[in-house]
Image (cartoon, rainbow, N blue to C red):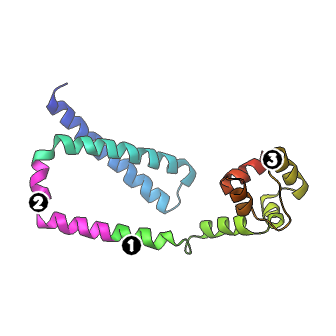
């Protein structure tokens, strides 16, 4: 396969994968088929990085002129600032109800967390005891995980076995 064919393939794939990511991103934003679309969107995002890198490689000379323009630098700064704003805003977790619920579940007394998980206390103590993990009365899942050098999610998964 010659360089021109590879360049055409890279450009076509970049365009098509971008289209899939754009459509699936809009679907995720509006919660349309979330479960079905999420993993495809993430995997196609990785594919997009690869094909965009190939596209950049095969089209570097013409693009190099574009990279030196003022408008490109303004775009880089603008996208960087907006992206940083999203990261800073989402890092505190206070606006994310899922994070709030998970944090509350992991930090509540174990008896309360088990009620939410629909697991009987005695059954939970048996499961964890069989794995060498002991529960104290007012301990929470987060404390149990730290005491046993586990992630809180690992503890919850054990309880669901």
Q: How crowded is mark 3: few (under 14 residues within 10 Å), some or many (20 or more)?
A: few
Placement of the C terminus among the 4 image quadrants: top right
Furthest residue to the right?
122
With 13 as the anchor, is 4 left or right in this view? left
Q: Residue at x 25, y 69 (%)?
A: 77
With 125 as the anchor, is 161 left or right in this view? left
Residues at marks 2 and 1, CA–CA distance in whole angstroms:
26 Å
Residues at marks 3 and 2, CA–CA distance in whole angstroms:
61 Å
Q: Position of residue 89 (x, y in %)?
A: 46, 73
Furthest residue to the top?
1
State which mark lies toward you, 3 or 1: 3
For residue 85, the mark is 1
Q: Position of residue 6 (x, y in %)?
A: 21, 32
The vertical placement of 94 against 3, above or below, is below
Q: Which residue is drawn at 27% across and 44% down?
A: 53
Q: Main secondary structure of the magenta part?
A: helix
With 12 as the anchor, is 44 left or right in this view? right
Per the image, label 2 sits on a secondary structure element best described as: loop
The vertical placement of 136 against 157, above or below, is below
Q: Position of residue 133 (x, y in %)?
A: 80, 51
Q: Which of marks 3 and 2 is nearer the N terminus?
A: 2
Q: Name the residue under label 3.
A: 132
Disc tally is 3
Q: How crowded is mark 2: few (under 14 residues within 10 Å), some or many (20 or more)?
A: few
Q: Is residue 79 magenta?
A: yes
Residues at marks 3 and 1, CA–CA distance in whole angstroms:
44 Å
State which mark lies toward you, 3 or 2: 3
Q: Give the range drawn in magenta.
A: 62-81
Pointer 3 with pointer 1, Cβ within 8 A: no
Q: Earlier in the sequence, mark 2 or mark 1?
A: 2
Q: Mark 2 points at which residue?
A: 68
Q: Which of marks 3 and 1 is nearer the N terminus?
A: 1
């Amino acid at each position: 396969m010659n360089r021109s064919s590879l360049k055409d393939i890279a450009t076509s794939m970049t365009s098509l994968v971008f289209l899939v990511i754009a459509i699936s991103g809009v679907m995720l934003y509006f919660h349309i088929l979330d479960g079905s679309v999420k993993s495809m969107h993430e995997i196609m995002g990785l594919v997009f990085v690869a094909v965009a890198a190939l596209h950049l490689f095969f089209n570097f000379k013409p693009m190099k002129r574009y990279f030196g323009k003022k408008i490109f630098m303004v775009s880089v700064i603008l996208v960087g600032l907006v992206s940083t704003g999203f990261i800073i805003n989402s890092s505190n977790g206070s606006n994310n109800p899922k994070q709030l619920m998970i944090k509350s579940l992991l930090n509540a007394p174990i008896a309360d967390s088990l009620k939410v998980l629909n697991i009987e206390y005695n059954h939970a103590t048996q499961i964890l005891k069989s794995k060498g993990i002991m529960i104290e009365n007012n301990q929470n899942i987060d404390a149990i995980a730290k005491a046993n050098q586990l992630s809180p999610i690992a503890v919850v998964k054990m309880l669901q076995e």
